Each structure stands twice: as C-alpha cells, then as structure tokens.
Amino acid sequence: MNLKQWAEREGVHQVATYRWFREGKLPVPARRVGQLILRDPAVTTIVVEHRDRFVRFGAEYVEAALAAQGRRLLVVEPPEVDGDLVRDVTEILTSLRAHLYRRWDVADRVRRAVEAATGDEPA
C-alpha cells in the first residue's frame, strides 16, 4: 500500500501524511523503498514509470553506477522532450520562473496595499 492510499483509508490529509513520513513520525512502519532497492544487490533491474519520479537531476550518473554493478534502470514512459540538457534547462527555468513570479506577485500586492492606504493613484 502506498502513502496516498494509507492516508485515504485512515482519513488523514495527504500533506500531513507526507510530512509525518518525511519527519519519521508516521504511526505505522514505513520505509523508503527506493533506497532499499538501490542497496539490494539482488535487484538487477529497477523499473520506473517516469525518470523524474526516480531522480530529478543526475539520472545518468545513477544509471552509470547501476551499469557498473551489472544492473539497469528501465524507464517505461519515455520523456516527451528529447535530450537531457533540454529537460534539465526546462526544469531549472520553470523553478526560477515560479520564484520570480511569486516575488513579483508579493511586490505587486504590497504596492497596491500602500496605494490603497495612502489614497494615491497608480502612476
């Protein structure tokens, strides 16, 4: 059973459940399966649905390390965008854009609040 299914069954919000898992405070035994799979030399093939769900950056290094041990990573769903560089740049730009617009949004809200409080019209 995965964490989402457990949360739904127990009536606990998914965000709280994930936070408990991350902090090691989940009231039931839970393990990070990915780490166990990587540590177990008996596992020769690791199958993942999407490469990004296995590791965000540096999947090539993990694949090379697995290949050196005679193991392999099998990605069931190939990425939509070809090329590691394109995928990495897209993820970085998406992250930076999110930070930029959050800051702009906060600055805009502050500016509008000051204008409303002082009665000044926007320039």
Image (tube, grey):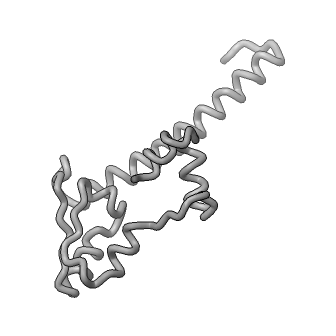
- Whether 107 is drawn above or below 50: the answer is above
Nearer to us in this view, 114 or 4: 4
Identify the residue at horizontal 53%, vertical 45% (top origin): 99
- Whether 20 is drawn above or below 106: the answer is below
Identify the residue at horizontal 78%, vertical 24% (top origin): 114
- Whether 66 is drawn above or below 78: the answer is below
Q: Can you give x and y, in whole percent of width and height, for residue 28 in the image? A: 56, 59
Q: Can you give x and y, in whole percent of width and height, for residue 1 in the image? A: 39, 53
Answer with the quarter of the image where residue 120 lies.
top right
Count of number-bearing discs? 0
Q: Is residue 83 left or right of residue 112?
A: left
Q: Is residue 11 left or right of residue 90?
A: right
Q: Is residue 118 left or right of residue 96?
A: right
Residue 86 appearing in the image = no
Answer with the quarter of the image where residue 52 lies.
bottom left
Q: Residue furthest right?
A: 118
Identify the residue at horizontal 18%, vertical 47% (top origin): 80
Q: Can you give x and y, in whole percent of width and height, for residue 122 in the image? A: 68, 16
Residue 50 appearing in the image = yes
Q: Can you give x and y, in whole percent of width and height, for residue 76 in the image? A: 17, 56
Q: Residue furthest bottom?
A: 69
Identify the residue at horizontal 56%, vertical 44% (top origin): 15
Quadrant the C terminus occupies: top right
